[in-house]
Amino acid sequence: MRKYDVNLLKEIKRKEYSENVNGIDILFKPVPDDDRKHVLDCRILEVIKQKSALFTERNKVGFRISNERYRPDKITYDLTETEITEEELLIHIDEDHFIDIFIYKPLNSNESLLPTLIYLHGGGFIAGDMKLYRNQMKLIAEKANAVVIFPEYRLAPECPYPGALNDAMGTIHWVAQHAKEYGIDASRIMLAGDSAGGALTNACLLSDTTKIIKRAFEIYPGCDSTDYKNQTLFTWSYDYYPVIDEHKEYAYTRIDRIKNTVGKSSKENFYTQGKVELDDPIISIIYASDDQLKDFPPMTVVSAEYDYLRVSSDYFVQRLKAVNVPVKSIQYCGSDHGFLDMLGSYVQAEDLCIEIAKEINQM
């Protein structure tokens, strides 16, 4: 089920264009049915208006982790046209605990060994689970004719750093060790993640000394957890987010939802809890050295036009390009942080799943 005309996918493709911005080539994907620049997609704008009431009520009672983990506003639809199997497994991590993983695979694939995507979900390290991502994983598996593996890594604040990283790396090693058993081509493993999952992807790339990961795909990744007001590597400003006047209030509301979470100390941060500094590259990849970055695999970095994280992820792309890492940059115009969460409601989410599938098939 789609809540939009499927032909809008073709319109995004028809209208997309590349432009060099501050030294990086960006593939821009415009709003498919609005020829104006710097506007919110009409479907996204409508959801932002609906969400404002929800967040107003939640703000009255203050932060509650249960509210972050229960998100009835995030609804996805199954867009697959063929049967995709789902298998749930408990795998042993570090010989001291188990985590749940979900394996998605086309039922009638003709290949004996398939390329594989390991996907690390977003949610600020404190939320996110299979229920929010099942339909996206199924669609990617179908479009790529690939195995997709989704680990439910342990969440903060109950399990702070390095819990999520250990679980992600444990999953990567498990996949490599059990590849043939699950019809996986161990030479074609891609790692991907959105938001906090993008930050976790970078942490895994720093930790992947045996180079299991052959390609990476990051969706509005968290590249910098430090306070932007003290940032010296790049500047952040609302000036980097041009928007028509009638949409400004709504666009800024979405930018501020992420912006207002920064500025905490490492001890106050639910994930780090003082166990590692926020400017450690394992948390904020923009602080990595050139020597650390130059060994990264080919990568795609996706941003949303009205996302606080876009500025830092663009800087990260510049860093990768400077050390000759093959990197693609894609920006979805008129979109906000978290648009992948709305598969079937936002055409951009479906287009993004197709882009992920394309990259899997580049391995």
Image: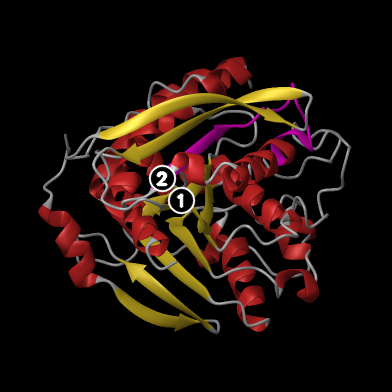
Residue neighbourhood size for the residue with mark 1, other residues' Cα within 10 Å, grouped as few (<14), some (14–19), many (≥20): many
Residue under the image location 24 percent in, 47 percent down: 42
Does residue 287 appear in the picture of this structure?
yes
- Pinpoint residue 255: horizontal percent, then vertical percent: 51, 48
Q: Which residues are magenta?
A: 147-165
Horizontal relation, residue 184 to residue 38: left or right: right
- Pinpoint residue 266: horizontal percent, then vertical percent: 84, 40
- Pinpoint residue 44: horizontal percent, then vertical percent: 31, 44
Badge number at residue 147: 2
In the image, 145 versus 309, the foreground residue is: 145
In the image, 115 versus 47, the foreground residue is: 115
Residue under the image location 37 percent in, 63 percent down: 361
Residue under the image location 65 percent in, 35 percent down: 125
Type of the residue with mark 2: Val
Type of the residue with mark 1: Thr
Mark 1: which secondary structure? strand
As displayed, is residue 333 above or below residue 19? Answer: above
As displayed, is residue 17 above or below residue 143? Answer: below
Question: Mark 1 or mark 2, which is nearer the start of the sequence?
Answer: 1
Mark 2: which secondary structure? strand
- Residue that label 1 marks: 116
Q: Quadrant of residue 27?
A: bottom left
User: What quarter of the picture does the N terminus occupy?
Assistant: top left
As displayed, is residue 342 above or below residue 239? Answer: above
Number of marks drawn: 2
Residue 344 magenta: no
Horizontal relation, residue 127 to residue 139: left or right: right
> Is mark 2 in CB contact (under 8 Å) with mark 1?
yes
